[in-house]
Amino acid sequence: MVALALLIATGNAHASEPIVGDAIVIDGDTIEIAGERIQLSGVDAPEGWQVCLDETGADYQCGKVSARALNIFLSASRPTRCEIVARDRYGRFVATCFRADGEDVNRWLVETGNALERANLNQGLYTAAQAMAQSAGIGIWRGQPQGGRPERITREDLRTEDAQ
């Protein structure tokens, strides 16, 4: 317990040490523990401003929904432990994270349809989880055709709509 408190208090971690503490959700695939930004490895969640299509073809704020779902999931079993695999180009740690009960946070995001697998980064680790979410039509897959990539509005799309 003392070691955990020291880690949380200092916010310093080396790539070989896990980061453990109460996670603050930044967005659907980024959290912060003890002042350290952590990008969840192998997953890509919609950004907070992004919208997706629901089962009726209407827009919904999938980025906000993903972040909210992650917050609820992490809150159910604290603390969160992140196993660091690298640092990204922004200086954030890249990690696979686990709740206190051992649940793999990264996998949960993909299997619940709150994020996509970044296949090029994890050699297909979450391919089955994504296929399950897609075939069940849950999360960002709920309004999408089978086999397609979820429809998302980009910043450029928003600028074009605003200009009209």
Image (spheres, grey):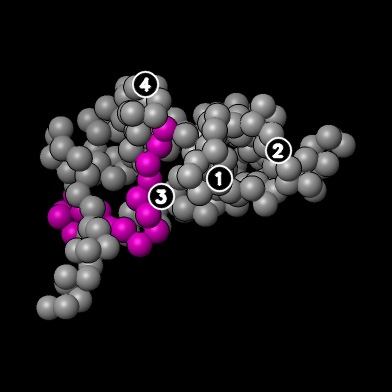
Q: If you read the primary sequence from the N terminus, does the residue marked by circle 3 or circle 2 appear first? A: 2
In this view, the mark in front (1 or 4):
1
Q: Residues within 10 Å of mark 3 (few under 14, many from 20)?
A: many
**Mark 1 sits on what residue?**
92
> In what element is the residue under mark 4?
loop
Residue at the far right in the pictured view: 2
Q: Residue at x 37, y 54 (%)?
A: 47
Residue drawn at the location 22% of the way across and 44% of the way down: 150
Secondary element under disc 3, as helix, strand or loop, is: helix
**Amino acid type of the residue tagged 4 in the rendering:** Gln
For marks 4 and 3 on the same chain, the one whose residue lies earlier in the sequence:
3
Q: Residues within 10 Å of mark 2 (few under 14, many from 20)?
A: some
Left or right: residue 104 versus residue 133 is right
Residue 3 in which image quadrant: top right
The alpha-carbon separation of the residues under discs 2 and 4 comes to: 26 Å
* CA separation in Å, label 4 and label 3: 23 Å
> In the picture provided, is 53 more to the left or to the right than 120?
left
Q: Position of residue 14 (x, y in %)?
A: 69, 34
Q: Quadrant of the C terminus?
A: bottom left
Q: Which residue is mark 2?
A: 13
Instruction: Kindly report the distance in space between the C-alpha atoms of the residues bearing marks 1 and 4.
Output: 21 Å
The residue that mark 4 highlights is: 123
Residue depicted at x 54% and y 33%: 86
Three-letter amino acid code at the position of disc 2: Ala
- Mark 4 is surrounded, within 10 Å at the Cα level, by few (under 14), some (14 to 19) or many (20 or more) other residues, namely few
**Label 3 sits on residue:** 66
Q: Which residues are magenta?
A: 42-58
Q: Is 28 one of the magenta-colored residues?
A: no
Q: Is residue 91 left or right of residue 124?
A: right
Q: Secondary structure at mark 1?
A: loop
Q: Could you classify mark 1 by the number of other residues whose Cα lies within 10 Å: few (under 14), some (14-19), or many (20 or more)? A: some
Rounded to the nearest angstrom, the CA distance separating label 1 from label 3 is 20 Å
